[in-house]
């Protein structure tokens, strides 16, 4: 049980990091550059976010089976790494950064990479904490998608584990499993809450 909780938490952390980096990068590009017609890609991302992962389960399953990624952590991570809602939230945060911050950094010799990592990301840390919290909770608690692509026991998420325990485990065992499963989300929530509190206590710009 403890091993599966640890594995599930590690998978959720990997998904969270990938989701934050990918969505933050996409949001920064949409906010920083005038892409013309490509700006409509944000509308496409938001439209895709309206559909649950289960609605695209069949094509995603066939794609993952064809690439040999079933029953791996990448089957859980890759199809849902890009999220239109996260991009929308982060783009709004990047849009709120005054241009003077970027202009001053460019004058001091910063390139686009430095503008993203050392200037922009620290200023949108509260929104990054929100996205990280959402991404972790989704990955840690997903049931249907994990049941479809991660049938190997080593790739079970906690809801899948508890679902399988429900058939034969006693009530005290189920209660203990759910209590243990609360640990990682509680830690992530506390960390995200502390980040949000510090950002609200100090002026942003």
Image (tube, grey):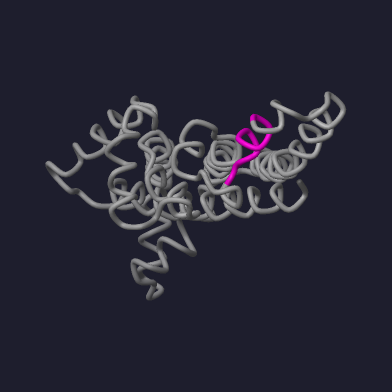
- Principal secondary structure, stretch drawn in magenta: helix
User: Which residue reaches farthest front?
Assistant: 168
Q: Provide residue 124's location: percent of width, then percent of height.
A: 51, 47
Q: Can you say whether 52 is above or below 28 in the image?
A: above
Q: Provide residue 69's location: percent of width, then percent of height.
A: 39, 55
Residue drawn 44% across and 43% down?
Answer: 149
Locate residue 84 relative to residue 190 in the image: left or right: left
Residue drawn 58% across and 42% down?
Answer: 136
In this view, the residue in front, 20 or 139, is 139
Residue 53, quarter of the rendered image: top left
User: Which residue reaches farthest right?
Assistant: 172
Residue drawn 77% across and 49% down?
Answer: 2
Numbered marks: total? 0
Locate residue 130 relative to residue 25 in the image: left or right: right
Q: Can you say whether 9 is above or below 92 in the image?
A: below
Q: Visible in this render: residue 204? A: no
Residue 190, quarter of the rendered image: top right
Residue 161 within the segment the image draws in magenta: yes
Q: Provide residue 129's location: percent of width, then percent of height.
A: 59, 44
Locate residue 111 relative to residue 201 in the image: left or right: left
The region drawn magenta spans: 156-163
User: Which residue reaches farthest left?
Assistant: 37
Q: Provide residue 25's location: percent of width, then percent of height.
A: 37, 54
Residue 6 within the segment the image draws in magenta: no
Q: Visible in this render: residue 40? A: yes
Q: Can you say whether 188 is above or below 173 in the image?
A: below
Locate residue 20 relative to residue 182 in the image: left or right: left
Residue drawn 36% across and 70% down?
Answer: 107
């Amino acid at each position: 049980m403890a091993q599966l909780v640890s594995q599930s938490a590690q998978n959720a952390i990997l998904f969270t990091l990938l989701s934050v980096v990918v969505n933050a990068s996409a949001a920064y590009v949409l906010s920083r550059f005038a892409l013309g017609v490509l700006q409509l890609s944000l509308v496409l991302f938001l439209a895709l976010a309206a559909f649950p992962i289960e609605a695209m389960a069949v094509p995603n399953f066939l794609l993952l089976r064809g690439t040999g990624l079933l029953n791996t952590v990448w089957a859980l991570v890759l199809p849902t790494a890009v999220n239109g809602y996260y991009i929308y939230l982060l783009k709004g945060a990047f849009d709120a950064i005054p241009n003077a911050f970027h202009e001053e950094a460019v004058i001091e010799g910063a390139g686009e990479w430095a503008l993203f990592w050392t200037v922009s990301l620290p200023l949108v840390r509260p929104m990054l904490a929100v996205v990280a919290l959402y991404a972790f909770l989704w990955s840690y608690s997903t049931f249907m998608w994990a049941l479809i692509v991660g049938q190997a026991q080593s790739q079970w998420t906690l809801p899948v584990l508890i679902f399988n325990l429900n058939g034969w485990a006693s009530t005290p065992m189920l209660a203990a499993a759910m209590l243990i499963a609360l640990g990682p989300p509680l830690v992530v929530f506390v960390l995200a809450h502390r980040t949000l509190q510090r950002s609200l206590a100090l002026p942003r710009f």
